[in-house]
Image: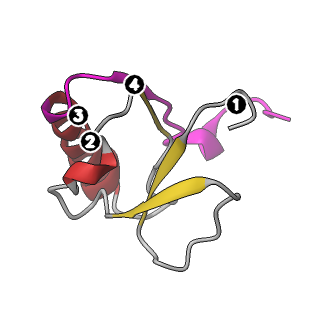
């Protein structure tokens, strides 16, 4: 946004608080398929979603990531960056 990029966010809740200028697309990684608008016309995708501790890891982290990859393929294969923190509470060193 500051560098002139348009930003779109996939959100589960219609009342999600987003910074000004961010376009919201309603969808849920744990309930594929994703709406086509989630990836249509984008150059890059940054995937940061993860199930909370004790949450639906199979639904969000596995099936949801697969659904996002399929949506990205259908949209023309934009660059996809996936960051995962599953199990971070078990790291043997502090991260701060």
- Label 3 to label 4: alpha-carbon separation: 14 Å
Q: Is 89 inside the magenta-drawn segment? A: yes
Q: Residue at x 32, y 63 (%)?
A: 28
Residue behind mark 2: 68
On the rendered image, what quadrant is the N terminus found in? Answer: top right
Residue behind mark 4: 43
Residue behind mark 1: 92
Which span of residues is magenta-colored? 74-96
Mark 3 or mark 1, earlier in chain: 3
Contact (Cβ within 8 Å) of mark 3 with mark 2: yes
Residue behind mark 3: 69
- Label 4 to label 1: alpha-carbon separation: 36 Å
Q: Position of residue 73 (x, y in %)?
A: 17, 28
Chief secondary structure of the magenta portion: loop
- Label 3 to label 2: alpha-carbon separation: 4 Å
For this rendering, which residue is in front, 5 or 65?
5
Label 1: which secondary element: loop
Label 3: which secondary element: helix
Q: Position of residue 24 (x, y in %)?
A: 47, 61
On the rendered image, what quadrant is the C terminus found in? Answer: top right
- Label 2 to label 4: alpha-carbon separation: 14 Å
Q: Position of residue 94 (x, y in %)?
A: 81, 34
**Image position of 19 (left or right of 63):** right
């Amino acid at each position: 946004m500051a560098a002139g990029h348009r930003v779109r966010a996939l959100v589960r809740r219609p009342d999600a608080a987003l910074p000004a200028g961010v376009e919201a697309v309603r969808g849920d990684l744990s309930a594929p398929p994703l709406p086509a608008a989630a990836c249509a016309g984008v150059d890059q995708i940054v995937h940061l979603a993860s199930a909370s501790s004790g949450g639906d890891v199979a639904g969000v982290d596995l099936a949801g990531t697969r659904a996002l990859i399929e949506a990205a393929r259908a949209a023309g294969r934009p660059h996809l960056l996936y960051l995962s923190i599953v199990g971070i509470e078990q790291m043997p060193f502090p991260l701060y």
